[in-house]
Amino acid sequence: MNDKSRCSWAQGNQLEKDYHDTEWGVPVHDDKVLFEFLILEGAQAGLSWSTILNKREGYREALDDFDVLKISKYDEFKVQELLNNPGIVRNKLKVNSTITNARLFIELKKEFGSFDAYIWQFVGGQPIINAWESASQVPVSTAESDAMSKDLKKRGFKFIGTTICYAYMQAMGMVNDHSTDCFCYSK
């Protein structure tokens, strides 16, 4: 697959290429994966996605494989343990937001039956298919990400601004932002 045309952001290391080729932009409806990326996208704030991809396994180990019920019960001792873990981004606000967001994620699942049912409503249950020729055309936010961010913030979620929400929508396949010359565009 290395000889195929990819989106310009996925020209770096093999980890980025593999992520681009197999995950990014593929519609996700599994609550566990939706939660994992909600946390990872928030952790990315101010950092590169490459940094987060490189720490993804560290996050899985540190956060009990993104077990939302376990994370929702983390205490101050666990927060300190996480802040000392070089395998994740050691930012107290981001660590605390992970716990807060886990608790709120559980509430949303109760209210809507699943987080999937809640989050996909922002795109009418179907991916938005864009036709960008280059990365410079791709927006950093949209009306849909604005609405998602506003609603999540109203519910108390943290590290969930509109740019983070749009990156989340891209990652979870809620929008197809592969460039039209990318071999993944028509998948």
Image: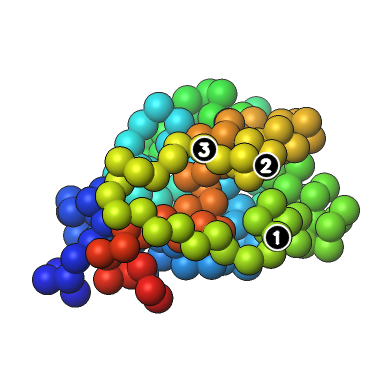
Q: Which amino acid does label 2 sit on?
A: Met
Q: Which residue lies furthest to the right in this view?
A: 111
Q: Percent from the top left, x then y, of residue 38? A: 57, 47
Residue 2 sits in quarter: bottom left
Q: Residue 19, labelled with which disc?
A: none
Residue 171 visible here: no
Q: Mark 1 points at which residue?
A: 124
Circle 2 residues within 10 Å: few <14, some 14–19, many ≥20: many
Could you tell me how far apart the alpha carbons at marks 3 and 2 are, in whole angstroms? 11 Å
Q: Is residue 137 visible?
A: yes
| Residue 141, label in figure | 3
Q: Please report whichever mark, 3 or 2, sits nearer to the chain's N-terminal start.
A: 3
Pointer 2 residue: 148
Q: Which residue is drawn at 52% across and 43% down?
A: 166
Q: Which amino acid does label 1 sit on?
A: Gly
Of labels 3 and 1, earlier in sequence is 1
| Crowd class of label 1 (few under 14; some 14 to 19; many from 20; radius 10 Å) | few
- Name which residue type carries label 3: Ser
Q: How far apart are marks 3 and 1 (CA)?
A: 17 Å
Q: Residue at horizontal 44%, vertical 40%?
A: 139
Q: What element carries label 3?
A: loop
Which mark's residue is nearer the viewer, 3 or 2? 3
Q: Are marks 3 and 2 in contact (CB under 8 Å)?
A: no
Per the model, the C-alpha gap separating discs 2 and 1 is 12 Å
Q: Earlier in the sequence, mark 2 or mark 1?
A: 1
Q: Is residue 131 left or right of residue 135?
A: right
- SS class, disc 1: loop
- Which quadrant, please, contains the N terminus? bottom left
Q: What percent of the width, then of the height, locates residue 64?
A: 56, 54
